[in-house]
Image: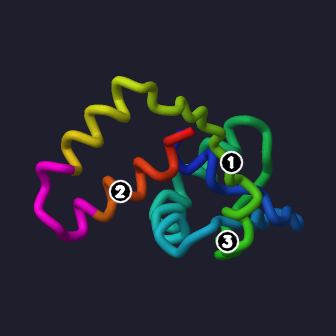
Amino acid sequence: PATLQLSCRVARIDRQHITLAVPAAAYAAKLRQLAPRILAALNEHGWNLTELGVRVQAALHKNQTKIAHRSVTPLDDTGLAAFQALHQNVSPGPLADAIATLLLRHRK
């Protein structure tokens, strides 16, 4: 399946045995359930395989991690004024502290 396709890698092919590596046990369980279908599909494409093994390798997932880059737009004077007004009308507590921290970080 397409959802598993991105998460698994061929770890080894030895004679008629293929071993797939996956990042978590949930993937391994699903692949074991689908093993007969996977083997049939591979055999249709010319592979002579009779056995499918699955290994969990937690480090496999780390190699696929992409770092998301986000752009941060600073608050303009209108936004800062709105947060200042909000800060004055909020009772003391965690929300007021968070708004004060936001104002400190975004003021020039």
Do tag 1 and tag 3 residues touch (Cβ < 8 Å)? Answer: no
Residue 16 seen in render: yes
Tell me if mark 2 has few (under 14), some (14-19) or many (20+) residues whose alpha carbon lies within 10 angstroms of its own.
Answer: some
- Range of magenta residues: 88-96
In this view, the residue in front, 68 or 57, is 68
Do tag 3 and tag 2 residues touch (Cβ < 8 Å)? Answer: no
Find disc 2 in the rendering and name its residue. Answer: 100
Question: Mark 3 is on which residue type?
Answer: Gly
Residue 20 seen in render: no
* Picture quarter with the C terminus: top right
Real-space Cα distance between discs 2 and 1?
30 Å
Real-space Cα distance between discs 1 and 3?
31 Å
Tell us which disc is closer to us: 1 or 3.
Answer: 1
Determine whether the residue tagged by mark 3 lies in a helix, strand or loop.
Answer: strand
Left or right relative to 21: residue 29: left
Determine whether the residue tagged by mark 1 lies in a helix, strand or loop.
Answer: loop
Residue 55 among magenta residues: no
Name which of mark 2 and mark 1 comes first in the sequence: 1
Find disc 1 in the rendering and name its residue. Answer: 67
Name which of mark 3 and mark 2 comes first in the sequence: 3
Q: Residue at x 41, y 48 (%)?
A: 103
Tell me if mark 1 has few (under 14), some (14-19) or many (20+) residues whose alpha carbon lies within 10 angstroms of its own.
Answer: few
For residue 43, the mark is: none
Tell us which disc is closer to us: 2 or 1.
Answer: 2
Residue 87 locus on image (x, y percent): 23, 50
Residue 12 locus on image (x, y percent): 84, 65
Tell us which disc is closer to us: 3 or 2.
Answer: 2
Find disc 3 in the rendering and name its residue. Answer: 53
Question: Mark 2 is on which residue type?
Answer: Ala
